[in-house]
Amino acid sequence: MAFLLVSSGLVHGGGTLERISASELEGKIYASWLGQCVGNIYGLPHENIYIENPGLDDFPLGYYDLSRLEKNNGAFSDDDTDIEYMYLLAMEKYGTEPSFAQLADSWKYHVRGKVWLANRAALAAMHFGYTPPATGYRANNPHWFQIDPQLINEIWAVTAPGMVGYSADKSAWAARIMDDYWGIEPTVAYAAMYSAAFFETDIDGLIRAAKESLDADSRFFNTIEEVEALHRDHPFDWKAARRKLALRYYREEPPDTRTIWNANLNGALGFLALLYGGGDFQLTLDLACSMGMDADNQAATLAGLLGLMLGVDGIPGDLLYPLGDRHWAEPLNDIYKNVSRHDMPDVGLKDLAHRTLAQAEKIILQTGGEKWVEDGRTYYRINTGAKFTAPLELPAGPPLFIEAGKSFRFPIPVSGGKTPYRWGIRGGTIPSGAAFRNGVIEGNVAEPGLYKLRVEVKNGDEKADREYRLLIRGKNLVPKAVRVLGGVKKTNTAVRDAMWLSVPKSFYADNLEEIIRDGKTLGPGSTFYSIRDEVTRQWDHYGYEWSREQRIGLIALHTGTVEENGGWFKTLNAEYRDMEGRWQPVENQVLSPELPEELPEGVNPYNKPHFVEYLLAFDAVQTKAVRIIGEAGSAKHWKSKKIPFTSITELSIHGPLPGFENM
């Protein structure tokens, strides 16, 4: 006897209906969680080890270190799985399609360390006030091309079984939190394979799904084809294929994106391991580790993928019971212990799977699928042609740059929803000389001033609004300056280059005077580091001197890149030189925004953003010299000495700003 329990209505999206039982679906989801945990823990000892050459081929490699499994009495969290758990919590709190703003709140609350590269840059931008996707833009995140999104977004596909298009689009959307351009493409490809693996049992079929999710002229599509060619050319020699792949995508990679964490490089290594593994869980896992680079991430992603495809029975028992089954009654003792994120409770792996299934069921029903009971068993029909449309949002990003007397045009960024958009003004004031039309603020404002404007956008029943600050600054007085002031005018490159550096070296400029007033805030030669020597404490200042007195009331500091061990101000104030030549503090200074809080010693500096602007406004002064001054920040780092320094790209000086008290 069969009867329908739940149906969302008509099938939409042009797909077919795939049938799967609830027990099989939950089993696949459970095996994927197990696989990701196994791959992550198994791969950790191989992380960032094999760079110039591939790793060992004495397979199986085995768990190198069981001490952490013993200590935690089961699986434990790491960045390959903990963000997905965080996203599951977000779905439970906000719904199956949370907004960028809601995910940003989750990041800021739960992630308080143990975060690097693009993820760290995105999180710091969130703390500065930006919301995704501005946190992943190339102009804001110098790590936009790194692997980060590939290892944290499988959850969007695991909760959308068989919905390859939906999964690919949703994962691309989420990947833009920290990456941009071709940096998101491997995430899309892996999402397509994860979603397809619920019904696909052939590796070539998975790869076909990955390629179909990408534009044929995209970088990673062509990378996959080159990986397939390497596999055909060297069918029995994975090391030869790996060497050629590393030459092509590491050694010959342009300098600005040549890192061992490059998304395209690591994504390609994962596909190579998948091809040579041929669907064998253990072999694929070992190959993922020995392919090298950021190997634990490929190990976790591929093990989760094959776990999903093969089920729990396809995962070797000694990987699930590494201490022997006499110690644990369930795989990995059915424990996922949180050791990496704030306020995320420990959870059982079976419970994780059950809760993930609950979200998958909601998505199945929301996208044209069905649920019914037949002979006492629950089944789903899944609309494989389901489509994803991101929530409508007005993301927060860099403020408008408007200079009095100069024409400007600012299209307000919008994310999600469907065109056409309908725009409107909900409040505030548009300054004389400016206008708002169809989502664009433009014009030419004659006088400095501070205005606020609340804009609304609608799309069907969806709507979003945001307040924008229109700060019209006076003419930049820097071109008239006769001298650049700085405590450090030339970077100690020997000390800098001995540090653990993660941003592209092309960003660095060695001489302050060449870059502080060239109008360039991004790209090669844009950033100066005030590294003098290996001091323990340092005060930095930057400023200008004029031959004649200037009337000054606003200073704009545009920072550059930061490193994990330094590159920011701990304190920041404005000073002017009086008639006797003494430096005096300005009065009634307003710093906008406030500097990020200093974190406890030893905590990863996850709240120090790249490429942002700080405004210092104050009561106007008449002076021939002005500067900003403050203590340089630093942090402990396992690869670098603690060296305080600041980072700067530009420093502009302007006349008084009326109403700055409300800035």
Image: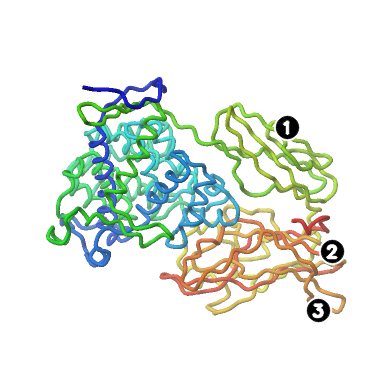
Q: Which residue is mark 2?
A: 620
Q: Nearer the viewer, residue 99 or 407?
A: 99
N-terminal-most mark, 2 or 3:
3
Where on the picture, by quarter, is residue 583?
bottom right
Left or right: 323 with respect to 450? left
Work out how far the residue at label 1 is from the one at label 3, CA to CA, in angstroms: 50 Å
Give the residue displayed 52% in from the left and 78% down from the top: 534
Left or right: 157 with respect to 633? left
Frontmost of labels 1 and 3 is 1
Amino acid type, residue under disc 2 in the picture: Ala
Are there few (<14), some (14-19), or many (20+) residues within 10 Å of tag 2?
A: some
Work out how far the residue at label 2 is from the one at label 1, CA to CA, in angstroms: 35 Å
Work out how far the residue at label 2 is from the one at label 3, CA to CA, in angstroms: 17 Å
In the structure shown, which secondary structural element does the residue marked by tag 1 occupy?
strand
Q: Which residue is mark 1?
A: 437
Residue 442 at what x, y percent from top left? 75, 38
Give the residue displayed 38% in from the left and 32% down from the top: 213
Q: How is the image coloured?
A: rainbow
Give the residue displayed 78% in from the left and 55% down from the top: 476
In the structure shown, which secondary structural element does the residue marked by tag 3 occupy?
loop
Residue 199 at what x, y percent from top left? 26, 31
Left or right: 493 with respect to 169? right
| Marks 2 and 1 close (CB-CB < 8 Å) | no
What's the mark number on residue 565? none
Residue 225 at what x, y percent from top left? 32, 36
Are there few (<14), some (14-19), or many (20+) residues within 10 Å of tag 1?
A: few
What's the mark number on residue 582? 3
Q: Nearer the viewer, residue 190 or 247?
A: 190
In the structure shown, which secondary structural element does the residue marked by tag 2 occupy?
strand
